[in-house]
Image (cartoon, rainbow, N blue to C red):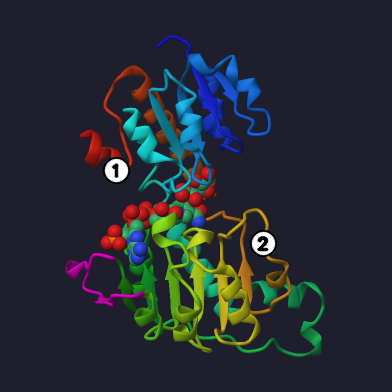
Amino acid sequence: MSKLDVLVMPKVHPLYVAALKAVHTVHEYNPADTAALVGVAPRIVGLAAGGESVVPGALISQLPQLKVLSVFGVGYDGIDVPTAIARGIPVTHTPDVLTDDVADLAMGLTLSVARNIPQADQHVRTGQWPQGPMRLGRKVSGSRMGIVGLGRIGSAIAKRAQAFGMSVAYTTRTERPGSGFAYYPTATALAAHVDFLVVITPGGQGTKHLINADVLKALGPQGYLINVARGSVVDEAALVQALSDGSIAGAGLDVFADEPNVPQALWGMPNVVLTPHMASATHQTRQAMADLAFANMQAGLSGQPLLTPVPECKAQMGL
Ligand code: NAP
Ligand code: 8YV
């Protein structure tokens, strides 16, 4: 394939960008300087984005020769997929290759917040151990886990929870009778029956504030919220309130409403564990994601079958 012009959204992972730069002419999109795009826009055939990227329809419309939009990430809630489909442009993502890592971090956050692991580390490092013991934690093994979204990652979390002797229940829009887990039709009903509520749905309008004050109230003062999905799925103001007034016991959060800005109210809370959207951030998985995103880009540019188009493109474009 000859060298082609590819546009890369801000903050796309360097491994993916490096692969693109090795074979194509890469242009970095700067939302603050859209005039810079005008000269190159007619030549752009590929668009590279990340799971957190926002790609509005207006940008897609500015690229008359665009052939493929390849996302480094399984989530693509910031991409205007309907506009891409209307133009006949397939959108791809990176499912499966990151499932284990995200499920691992969900369990890591569960253990961290329940057993006070970050606080215990500080207890030792700051010389507090000789002054007395840490406060007691909450037992994880044998407790009840509720999973909001029993897809690829939710199922992997369920498998890990079972290995901890936890009971597993879930909510989704469509019941999965074959899963063998108890189904609740709403997040509120699920929350009322579990100790740990793990959120792992896609983001976007369909799930915006799915976890609201009512769900947190149902989770209750002994319950913990774990969010590894998208910040938009949780009403963050309601969460801060619930954590402050003891309506829930604690939270483990990898994602936030306005990343990388995390509400300062959360910073000092002892019952919260915060990570910077890093659930898939291991060397092994980032490389696998970069390889898959790049392979999708190359397939799209050369007219070959795409490896992992998003479900809407499979359904509506017959991919
Ligand atoms: P998936 O296989 O498509 O699973 C999504 C699940 O969510 C499905 O079970 C789906 O079931 C359920 N769901 C969708 N809308 C729902 C709603 N309104 N109420 C309840 N359940 C709903 O996706 P995946 O591969 O597991 O990934 C899930 C998401 O994780 C991604 O989209 C991304 O946002 C997030 N993620 C985050 C990180 C991170 O770094 N923190 C990394 C990777 C992924 P129904 O369709 O039956 O409702
Ligand atoms: C990545 C993610 O951190 O896959 C997703 O949806 O949120 C994460 O794996 C992200 O895509 C990197 O841009």
Measuring from the top left, give residue 304's x and y in whole percent.
Answer: 28, 22
Residue 175 on the magenta segment: yes
Q: Main secondary structure of the magenta part?
A: loop
Q: Mark 2 points at which residue?
A: 262
Number of numbered discs on residues? 2
Callout 1 crowding tier (Cα within 10 Å): few <14, some 14–19, many ≥20: some
The three-letter amino acid code for the residue at tag 2 is Val
Question: Which residue is at 57% across, 74% downward?
Answer: 239
Question: Which residue is at 47% across, 59% downward?
Answer: 229
Quadrant in which the N terminus appears: top left
Measuring from the top left, give residue 206's x and y in whole percent.
Answer: 39, 58
Q: Is mark 2 on a helix, strand or loop?
A: loop
Residue 269 on the magenta segment: no
Callout 2 crowding tier (Cα within 10 Å): few <14, some 14–19, many ≥20: some
The three-letter amino acid code for the residue at tag 1 is Glu
Quadrant in which the C terminus appears: top left
Asked if the beta carbon under badge 1 is closer than 8 A to the nearest atom of ligand 1, the reply is: no
The part of the chain drawn in magenta is 173-186
Front in this rendered view, residue 210 or 125? 210
Q: Is residue 68 visible?
A: yes
Asked if the beta carbon under badge 2 is closer than 8 A to the nearest atom of ligand 1, the reply is: no
